């Protein structure tokens, strides 16, 4: 299998999911990613396992840290910091999401890292970017990506008694990690073609703004004289297209239609829903008439889908020409034949040899799904990495006794 990042070395001093997920993607693309963890506590996320313990495999750690090697270092200990500099000497990338105060205190700023390696690509993940009044503050995807950047507003109905939360854990973090990985790939290409290195910045706010960009741009275009509403609210309040929406089945599940060219697909929809009599109905005989009578047409579609259960429609609609989707939960997705056929979820062996499954990164090279390796145990590769740097067994023992390494 082609791994375009083979031969690339990344040193990561980062925690949680948003920025480490970029390292996981690069590792899946073939890079050697070395995760530097606190010598005693490790990545703070290791303490957040929130389900019954079943061996050493935990998606909250294995998802963002797949394929990496872990070394435990105390960067406040001069000997531990010296090991970090040794790791950096031949590295291509340094990746961190530490807050500015911690970066200054631990000497992880651009000028500190480039003393060890002037050509290294320096990458910062943050909540709010590197400038402005919030630059020193931390944040998570639930706050900086989801709530601050409009997604929560967009999915929360005006009459809702609560703000709708993100649909899944690390939702913005995973998208942000993929964004960082893409930026790193571009920087590597730029360095190879121009000889110039880069400083890369990606924030949860920037990823959130990009995800919400169409509504933001429309609001900027319309100005303050028009109160913005989300596209979802617009569809719910006054449907203009009967073949776009969510339709409830007889057993309380949902089928989604997203056919943005309604007249093109209307006859085929009618045939699949047993509404053949509507194909020649004068009310829906042209595109203009269909849109003018969209509410009435949507009512026919809603009533028809309500007559049968979810399982019936997921089978019966397989031949439907227009874009549609079952509204699925995690267990449905795991059993979705498209997931298996495309290698979107892959087997992985945990540290005890048990087969588990992880979602693959969304990029495939040469039509091949990736091979996925588990995330490292805490400081699992400390000795191996120190040996690779040329340290003797006595030197390794001295580093551990001094508390510089784990």
Image (cartoon, rainbow, N blue to C red):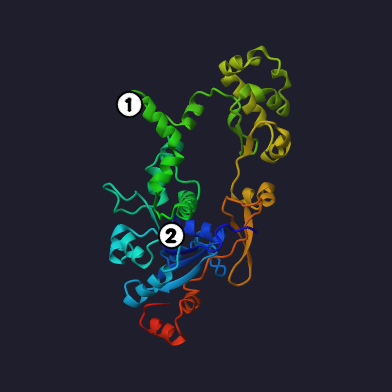
Q: Position of residue 66 (x, y in %)?
A: 54, 62
Rendered-image quadrant of the N terminus: bottom right
Residue lying farthest front? 194
Q: Which of the pair 117/374 is nearer the observer? A: 117
The residue carrying mark 1 is 224
Pointer 2 and pointer 1: residues touching (CB < 8 Å)?
no
Say whether residue 251 is visible: yes
Q: Position of residue 353 (x, y in %)?
A: 63, 71
In the image, taking residue 191 as reference, residue 309 lies left or right, namely right
- Assign a secondary structure to mark 2: loop
| Mark 1 surroundings within 10 Å by alpha-carbon count, few (fewer than 14), some (14 through 19), many (20 or more) | few
Q: Which of the pair 248/318 is nearer the observer? A: 318
Ranked by sequence position, the earlier of labels 2 and 1 is: 2
Say whether residue 42 is visible: no
In the image, taking residue 19 as reference, residue 291 lies left or right, namely right
Rendered-image quadrant of the C terminus: bottom left
Q: Which mark is residue 16?
A: 2
In the image, taking residue 56 as reference, residue 86 lies left or right, namely left
Q: CA distance from mark 2 to mark 1?
A: 38 Å
- Residue at 50%, 23% in the rendered image: 238
- Residue at 41%, 54% in the rendered image: 196
- Residue at 63%, 13% in the rendered image: 283
Q: Position of residue 352 (x, y in %)?
A: 60, 72
Q: Position of residue 93 (x, y in %)?
A: 44, 61
Q: Which mark is residue 103?
A: none
In the image, taking residue 402 as reference, residue 264 lies left or right, namely right
Q: Which of the pair 261/365 is nearer the observer? A: 365
Question: Would you identify the image quadrant in which residue 319 lies?
Answer: top right
Residue lying farthest top? 282
- Assign a secondary structure to mark 1: loop
Q: Is residue 230 above or below residue 84?
A: above
């Amino acid at each position: 299998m082609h791994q375009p990042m083979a031969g690339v070395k990344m040193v990561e001093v980062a925690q949680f999911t948003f920025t480490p997920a970029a390292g996981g993607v690069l590792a899946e693309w073939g890079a050697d990613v070395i995760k530097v963890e606190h010598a005693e506590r490790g990545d703070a996320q290791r303490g957040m396992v929130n389900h019954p313990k079943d061996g050493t495999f935990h998606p909250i750690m294995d998802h963002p840290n797949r394929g990496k090697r872990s070394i435990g270092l105390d960067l406040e200990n001069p000997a531990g910091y010296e090991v970090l500099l040794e790791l950096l000497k031949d590295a291509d990338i340094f990746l961190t999401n530490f807050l500015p105060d911690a970066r200054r205190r631990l000497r992880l700023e651009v000028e500190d890292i480039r003393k060890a390696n002037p050509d290294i690509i320096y990458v910062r993940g943050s909540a709010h970017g590197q400038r402005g009044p919030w630059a020193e503050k931390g944040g998570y995807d639930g706050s900086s990506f989801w709530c601050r950047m409009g997604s929560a507003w967009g999915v929360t109905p005006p009459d809702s008694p609560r703000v709708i939360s993100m649909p899944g854990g690390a939702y913005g973090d995973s998208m942000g990690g993929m964004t960082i990985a893409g930026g790193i790939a571009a920087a590597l290409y730029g360095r190879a073609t121009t000889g110039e290195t880069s400083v890369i910045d990606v924030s949860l706010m920037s990823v959130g703004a990009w995800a919400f960009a169409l509504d933001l741009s429309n609001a900027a275009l319309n100005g303050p004289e028009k109160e913005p509403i989300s596209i979802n609210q617009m569809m719910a309040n006054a449907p203009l297209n009967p073949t776009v929406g969510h339709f409830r089945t007889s057993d309380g599940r949902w089928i989604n239609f997203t056919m943005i060219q309604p007249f093109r697909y209307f006859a085929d929809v009618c045939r699949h829903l047993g509404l053949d009599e509507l194909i020649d109905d004068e009310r829906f005989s042209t595109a203009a008439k269909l849109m003018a009578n969209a509410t009435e047409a949507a009512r026919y579609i809603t009533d028809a889908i309500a007559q049968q259960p979810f399982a019936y429609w997921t089978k019966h609609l397989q031949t439907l020409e227009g874009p549609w989707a079952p509204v699925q939960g995690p267990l449905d997705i795991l059993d979705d034949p498209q997931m298996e056929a495309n290698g979107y979820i892959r087997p992985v062996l945990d540290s005890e040899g048990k087969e588990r499954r992880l979602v693959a990164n969304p990029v495939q090279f040469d039509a091949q799904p990736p091979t996925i390796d588990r995330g490292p145990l805490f400081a699992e590769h400390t000795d191996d990495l120190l040996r690779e740097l040329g340290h003797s067994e006595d030197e390794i023992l001295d580093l551990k006794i001094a508390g510089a390494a784990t």
